[in-house]
Image (tube, grey):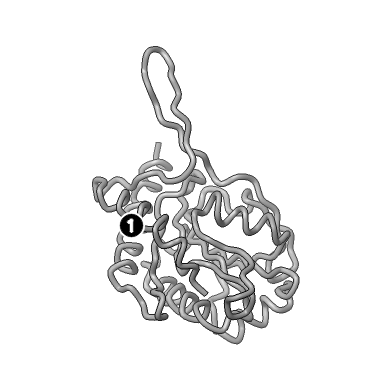
Amino acid sequence: MIKKGTAVSLLLFLVISCSQDPQRLPYLGKHDVVFSNGKVDTVYATIPAFAFRNQDSLPVTNKTYANKIWVAEFFFTSCPTICPVMNSQLVRLYNELPKKTRPTVQFLSFTIDPMHDGPAKLREYRKTHRIPLKNWDFLTGNELETHQLGIENFLTFAGRDGLSAGGYAHSGAFTLVDHTGHVRGVYAVTNFDLSVNEQEYKRMVKEINILYDEYLRTNKN
């Protein structure tokens, strides 16, 4: 279920993103101002080191997905409302990515209910929802650390909420992370009424393509 309190924060990120040069995505999240040789520079934090197990019970870390563009979501398999909509949009995105781009993009689905969502449950969920097998991992790990990772680093709400269906609440947003580990976009694709924000979806597709071009330029040097 979407946490309405996150809407304001997400809106701020989206406004920042829309105000930038469309061919150069902004950096989002925590940052420091650094003074060096008389110049002022802004240094943005990268996604910190993490360790999870995937749907095949294999240990994975942030290094497992190094030098790839990430599209990340926070969800849980027993979610009766927003999660099926979110995952249908990620499947749509996966299928619509150009073949040349797809190997560079890694989909990451972090469960926010790891006590219930072990690897076997994640495998079952992926099979039931006909989610593609390549470049898409479902991750389970420490619950508190997962929630903190979502809120503090991926810039999307994820946490317990006894008033929400399923006992958890999270935003309907996806987070785009570049191949160096910096957050470059947050997209509120799923609305409060479970409809799809097509404008946000198209913006996400466009900005993945921009980031892919940036990836190619960087890896040529």
Left or right of 5 in this view: 151: right
Left or right of 55 in this view: 169: left
Residue that extends furthest to the top in the rendered view of this protein: 37
Q: Is residue 197 above or below residue 65?
A: below
- The amino acid at mark 1 is Glu
Left or right of 31 in this view: 207: left
Q: Position of residue 33 (x, y in %)?
A: 44, 27
Point 49% across, 78% down: residue: 82
Residue 194 placement: quadrant: bottom left
Point 61% across, 74% down: residue: 76
Q: Is residue 3 above or below residue 127?
A: above
Point 43% across, 19% down: residue: 35
Q: Is residue 31 above or below residue 144?
A: above
Residues 56 and 26: in front is 26
Residues 148 and 105: in front is 148
Q: Position of residue 90 (x, y in %)?
A: 46, 72
Determine whether the residue tagged by mark 1 lies in a helix, strand or loop: helix
Residue that extends furthest to the bottom in the rendered view of this protein: 128
**How many numbered marks does the figure carry?**
1
Q: Which quarter of the rendering shows the C terminus?
A: top left
What residue is shown with label 1? 207
Residues 10 and 140: in front is 10
Estimate how packed mark 1 is, as few (under 14), some (14 to 19) or many (20 or more) residues with alpha carbons within 10 Å: many
Residues 104 and 175: in front is 175
Q: Is residue 130 above or below residue 6?
A: below
Q: Position of residue 156 (x, y in %)?
A: 50, 59
Point 64% across, 46% down: residue: 49
Q: Position of residue 65 (x, y in %)?
A: 58, 54
